[in-house]
Amino acid sequence: MWPVPSLKRCDLTCSALLLCLLLLIFSPASAQNKSPARTPSPKQDEQEIDPDDVISVNTTEILLPVTVRERNGSLVSNLTRKDFRIFEDDVEQTLSDFSLRNVPVDVALIVDASSSVAGNLDDFRNAAEGFASHLEQDDRISLIQFDDRVLMLQDWTRSLVQLRRALRRIVPGKFTRFHDAMLLAAREQAPRKNARHAIIVLTDGIDSNQGITFAAALRAALEAQTTIYVVSNSGIERSKKQEELASLLAANSAAVRFNQLRIDDLRLGLQALDESEHRLEQLTSATGGRLYKPNSFNDLERTYAEVAEELRHQYTLYFSPLNVRRDGQFRRLRVETLDPSRQITARIGYYAPKK
């Protein structure tokens, strides 16, 4: 007869515990926490809605690397904050108090391993190692190869040993997916917060048209706010083609007719190189970088050393845009110094964040 009274006592006890739990959950103190109190004043970093239903925020500071040169091309490294003026869509902006900082740089090294460069990869390896040796302790470097494919050979590292191992893994290919490589480096190789982002690529810039367009690659670079430096072997390739073309055209008429297909091919190649250089000028100018055209692969080490020198003497300007609309629109930038004779290189603008 004991089990039945025991179960009844258990039911009573469980009911009492459940009642206490419900009273605790819906007690006045708990209800006060769940009921809406007075609307808190918005914090500084919270979004607010303006009368036009456009989200406006205190937009994150824009980081703008700027290079200043004298007329003779020498780098200027003694300017101060008061020497600069910056305009966004022709509206002058206010530089922050920390507008000139010693900012680390994350550099994506990209090598075109297609047939036009394949025979000189050792020159690139030596130049890349020399460039890395000029970086500061807090800078990082990565390595990307492109030809038929786009391959990440080394993710961000500060180790020269790791870079050296990655350089040995470069294998020559055939075609050139230059635009795809730019997209990968711009979007997938994002820099650290408050670090400069630079891409240095060795290529002739001729894309095999198997992937994205040049316009898409340029937009990706501007969206990523990266600076692109191109070491172009187009001049080297042009000299080879011009020399061969001149030799073929100097032959007798019968030989010219026999080699007409090759002559036409060389002329098309020279035209492609001209168009490529024009696009590379656009790419580097728009992103605040520079196009280098060494005369031979023997000049690669000196050229990469020049890029490293520019990165060391680059000013980094910060400002919070007065236009805080998150409309995804392109904002055009212009930088001036007190001396108008100086040459200023900076990114042409950026894309505002979207809602």
Image (cartoon, grey):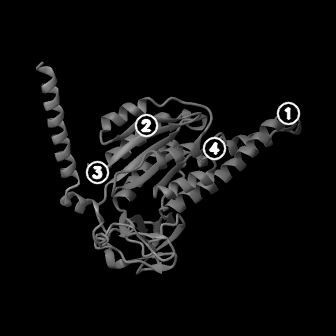
Q: CA distance from mark 4 to mark 3?
A: 33 Å
Which of the image's four quarters has the N terminus?
top left
Lateral position of residue 157 relative to residue 331, left or right: left
Q: CA distance from mark 1 to mark 2?
A: 40 Å
Of the residues under marks 4 and 3, which one precedes in the sequence? 3
Of the residues under marks 4 and 1, which one precedes in the sequence? 4
Q: Residue at x 54, y 35 (%)?
A: 113
Where in the figure is residue 277, as x and y percent of width and height? 62, 53
The residue labelled by disc 3 is: 136
Res. 147 image quadrant: top right
In the depicted structure, whether residue 139 falls above or below residue 120: below
Of the residues under marks 4 and 2, which one precedes in the sequence? 2
Where in the figure is residue 108, as x and y percent of width and height? 43, 46
Q: Residue at x 16, y 41 (%)?
A: 16
Of the residues under marks 3 and 1, which one precedes in the sequence? 3
What amino acid type is highlighted by mark number 2?
A: Arg
Q: CA distance from mark 3 to mark 2?
A: 19 Å
Q: Residue at x 62, y 51 (%)?
A: 214
- Marks 3/1 in contact by CB < 8 Å: the verdict is no
What amino acid type is highlighted by mark number 3?
A: Glu
The residue labelled by disc 1 is: 258
What amino acid type is highlighted by mark number 4?
A: Asp
For the residue pair 129 and 279, the one nearer the viewer reads as: 279
Mark 3: secondary structure: loop
